[in-house]
Amino acid sequence: MYKLTGFADEAANSIQGQVEALKRLGWNALELRAVDSTLAHDLSEEAFSFVADYLDQENISVPCLGSGIANWSRPVTEPFDQTKETVKRAIKRMKRLNTSLVRIMSYKVLHDEDGRISRDQLLKERFDRLNWICQSFLDQGITPVHENCHTYGGLSAEHTLEMLEAVKGMKLVFDTGNPPITIDGRSEFPYVAQNSYEFFHAVKDHIEHVHIKDAKWDSDRKELYFFPGEGAGDVRKIVAELKRDGYSGYYSIEPHMEVVFHDTGVESNDERRMQNFVSYGKQFEKILAEV
């Protein structure tokens, strides 16, 4: 039996609505990112306690915390004390939730004034910070998983492998939909998009968790999102290989079709959000059955 979860904050802002979306699918696991538009590790103590108690009441587990640590909005030059406080708070809350995986990233990519990737990515500082972050989680029995997104480690499979060599104990969450909407840091400016299957195949031995998303650029490089199997994310091919390889982790849906967490310009009404999330989950279940 496959283990299924999802970013249900794309179905509803409230924790009650998120649980309702999961129950419509017959699922009992939530990848917790945000509640009422606030990241879980940034909620007030009172708000977080309500969320944790409600999840217990409804028998919903949290296999992974979708943290904002070192994400695409965070410069590697920001005061590190801010990150340290977030990590400490996340650990405390993950223990309350009995959560063993935390999604992290590797800080914003530095660009020059022309939009080219800067030669100096402050790698020593970047990797030193990531080592502190990862070791802090590992010391508490939590596995940090890096997502291939718009941060340094997501620039290509080679960047990911370089980072894994430098940051001990880091594992990966592979997002199928990010490569087709992410520049390949190995290519020439203005850069081409990555190939999802090629990226996956190069790093698959390090994958502990999988995000199911599907996307591609249009001719103007606008990000377009699709139901799984309908974009350029090689979802079917990747899932088929994961099944052949005996992958035993979670598949976590992240539609981005009605709501995009990092883009407040993408909005939808409540029922459309709920219906899209549920339809997305059902379509992915169909893919799992077919490949």
Image (cartoon, rainbow, N blue to C red):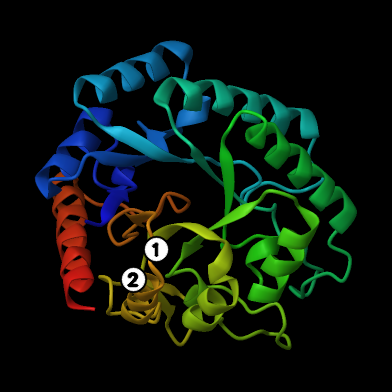
Horizontal side, residue 260 vs residue 113: left or right: left
262 vs 52: above or below: below
Can residue 221 be seen?
Answer: no
> Residue 284, image x and y in percent?
22, 66
Q: Nearer the viewer, residue 267 or 44?
A: 44
The residue at which mark 1 appears reads as 247
Mark 1: which amino acid?
Tyr
Q: Quadrant of the N terminus?
A: bottom left
Q: Quadrant of the C terminus?
A: bottom left
Can residue 78 be seen?
Answer: yes
Horizontal side, residue 199 vs residue 65: left or right: right
Figure disc tally: 2
Indicate which disc residue 243 carries. Answer: 2
Q: Secondary structure at mark 2?
A: helix
> Residue 181, image x and y in percent?
50, 74
Badges 2 and 1: C-beta atoms under 8 Å apart? yes
